[in-house]
Image (tube, coloured by chain):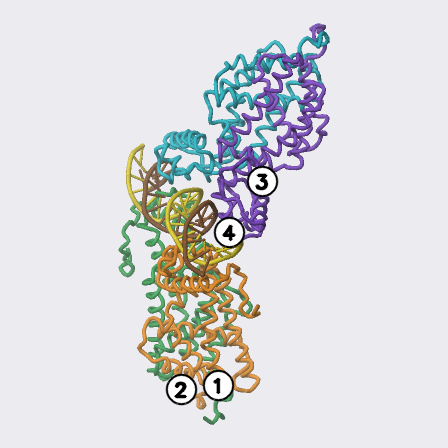
Chain colours: A green, B orange, C purple, D cyan, E brown, F yellow
Amino acid sequence: MPVTTASPDAKQPRTDRGRKTRRAILDAARSEFGERGFHEASISGITRRAGVALGSFYTYFDSKDALFRALVRDMSDQVRDHVAPVLQSAPDQVAAEQAGLKAFIDFVRGHKEIYRIIDEAEFVDPESFRAHYSTTAERIAQRLEAAAARGEVRGDHSEVHAWAIMGMNVFLGLRYGVWGEELSADTVARAVARLLRSGLVPEQGTQSG
Amino acid sequence: MPVTTASPDAKQPRTDRGRKTRRAILDAARSEFGERGFHEASISGITRRAGVALGSFYTYFDSKDALFRALVRDMSDQVRDHVAPVLQSAPDQVAAEQAGLKAFIDFVRGHKEIYRIIDEAEFVDPESFRAHYSTTAERIAQRLEAAAARGEVRGDHSEVHAWAIMGMNVFLGLRYGVWGEELSADTVARAVARLLRSGLVPEQGTQSG
Amino acid sequence: MPVTTASPDAKQPRTDRGRKTRRAILDAARSEFGERGFHEASISGITRRAGVALGSFYTYFDSKDALFRALVRDMSDQVRDHVAPVLQSAPDQVAAEQAGLKAFIDFVRGHKEIYRIIDEAEFVDPESFRAHYSTTAERIAQRLEAAAARGEVRGDHSEVHAWAIMGMNVFLGLRYGVWGEELSADTVARAVARLLRSGLVPEQGTQSG
Amino acid sequence: MPVTTASPDAKQPRTDRGRKTRRAILDAARSEFGERGFHEASISGITRRAGVALGSFYTYFDSKDALFRALVRDMSDQVRDHVAPVLQSAPDQVAAEQAGLKAFIDFVRGHKEIYRIIDEAEFVDPESFRAHYSTTAERIAQRLEAAAARGEVRGDHSEVHAWAIMGMNVFLGLRYGVWGEELSADTVARAVARLLRSGLVPEQGTQSG
DNA sequence: AATGAATGAGAGTTCATTCAT
DNA sequence: TATGAATGAACTCTCATTCAT
């Protein structure tokens, strides 16, 4: 069992058959919650999709809530794992954010249920919801501060900037990842990078304040 | 019949007493939905808060869903009405967005339930949810395009910029309006305005790309 | 007020306006009960059809049940009033029953709601239901006995015969009055008369196997 | 899968325990619907009688309506199964109808709830109601036509005769099966048989006034 | 470990009836 | 006499959870 994500949920399967059942339930839950939302989703619907008996659910999860929490953490981790690598290899911080946004939109296009699941945590399990966004924002803020130390960006208001960037990313992911794909992920990310680099106002150098 | 607010819900009260009851139910619903969320909220809880009988609810609303929809539209309109005026008097577009964000955070601080209600529409009544954010983004995009015509901002990718700005505003409202008030609305709005004006990267003029 | 049907329902209107309102409610009730049945029918539906306010209903009727009872008695009387006259002028008893059945089917074709209303009394107000059919059967039995005294029919088992005749009439009315009109009322009545006159078996007495 | 009773209702029990529970609910429903009628009957009343939890009802039936439909079909089949055998062994068609009516009245005396249940279908599930009576009448008509081919009865108007016979049977069952037992089933059946054989009119042709 | 029947609290909704105006 | 808002008991149905097998 990995140390970092030792879960307090217990109910870990002890046999191979068990592991397979648990995995089937988790996958089914992702579809069910994604398609119908937490409240409309039902345990019986999940076990039906998973092809296991209703009662088996409680062999692996304590409750509907516990399953949902596990799923939110899982998806949150998946986003991070998908985006984190591309941040490393960028030449500067703005380029890193650009690459991150592109990777994020790409990920979202392949996992459209992520919005319904993470956003619904606001109602089902506010702690998970707060944890997800607080952690994400903090990571961005740390990157910005490191970049500021390297002189790449201004160092004031890193937290505000972090939340602003996260907000942009989330809504652009919703708009161009889930709702429509009129623009390529790359186009969107480049437009945002330019905004981050020099703002919206043209001909910066010649403006008199 | 006024064109702007003609509601298709019927069930409008015909007496003063009726109007007062309907208003009481709406107010109670705002609290109940805000505090407990749509699914945890109950009609009986709402009528208890409103001080009317359970059955009276159905004198004015067709269903729990219909009430929720009415509420979402109502709050959506309220935000717009609160923010719109301050946009007019700004000297330029960036200043307008700054004023708008400040007004928005202020509004949110006085109506913290707005997030729970509008966001939950994603699950309860996706159409309202989409309508709210699509409309909001379009309004921003139009402002940007008008500003571009005046030479105040770049005119490319107005839609992307609009969604980016809306995303920033929403998350900053959540962070500094609902979750905490460590920074003044003005401080946050100024930080964002500077980002919009000239980006995150210092000493713009001397960078060689 | 006629002596014979002095109703204990009280709530008789005292003005012309009142009489018109009461009549409107009764007519509306006939349609509503006929179309939707007693339980699906609603007082508000009836008053809506009648074009009067909900509360006005209770000015003229004590309850939904009382209205229903009034209606059953009313329709029961109407059938009788429609059928009775034709019985008088028949040359013999079988001819009378033939004329009665024809008149009944004709009446039913113009008042298809009668079955739903009278039959539903079995559930809503069993006493009305029993009263309607017992009275009808007794009337037939008395006619048969009078006819037997005149030598027109056999005199044994008049009650059984009365119920048999009533049963035939009711189901033929349902079949050829309400459900379909493939045969004329006259054809049906003549077929039944022949059955009553000489039975179903051909050439009595001379049958060879 | 047996062809004859393949029910489209799904929700069939898979264990013996389940089969017993389903049966208990059906039996309880028969009593409850018979005593109180469809609308006054309640699911909770049924499950209370059956000695199972309220929720268990929905393990085996989709709705109150679905249960009612199942019951109507069940009782309709039971009558047929009870009456059909005695029709076979009669020497001629009139004798068959006599035996059938006797069997029917006997059955009704042991199952007085059958009228309330089948008749209420007119309001709750008109299709079942029509199906029951149309099918019954058709069966009688076919018997009459076969008998006509054998020269036992007249062959004209078989459908009218079938509905007439069914109507007699139904009302005589109500009168002497459910409402009172003043006459034996046999007496009633013999009186009807004589009517069918030779009509109501005495000594055809030799009557002197 | 797996099954699926059983449980019952709790929800939204309807509508006959009352009553203040 | 007429109105229509207010009432609340009662209903059907859902589903997370438990448990005997």
Q: Which mark is residue B202?
A: 2
Give x and y (percent) for residue C47: 54, 49
Q: Which mark is residue B89?
A: 1
Quick one: label 2 or label 1, which is nearer the N terminus? 1
Give x and y (percent) for residue D121: 53, 34
**Residue drawn where x is 64% and y is 34% of the image:** C178
Residue D125, relative to residue C193: is it above or below? below
Q: 10 Å neighbourhood of mark 3: few (<14), some, or many (≥20)?
A: many
Q: Which mark is residue C34?
A: 3
Labels 2, 1: front one:
1
Question: How far is disc 3 from disc 4 in space, using C-alphas?
Answer: 20 Å
Tags 2 and 4 touching, CB below 8 Å: no
Residue type at the position of mark 2: Pro
| Left or right, residue D78 beside residue A23 | right
Secondary structure, mark 1, is loop
Q: Do the dots labelled 3 and 4 sit on one chain?
A: yes
Residue type at the position of mark 1: Ser
Labels 4, 1: front one:
4
* Label 3 chain ID: C
Residue type at the position of mark 3: Gly
| Residue indicated by mark 4 | C54
Tags 1 and 3 touching, CB below 8 Å: no
Labels 2, 3: front one:
3
Secondary structure, mark 4, is helix
Give x and y (percent) for residue F19: 28, 38
* Label 2 chain ID: B
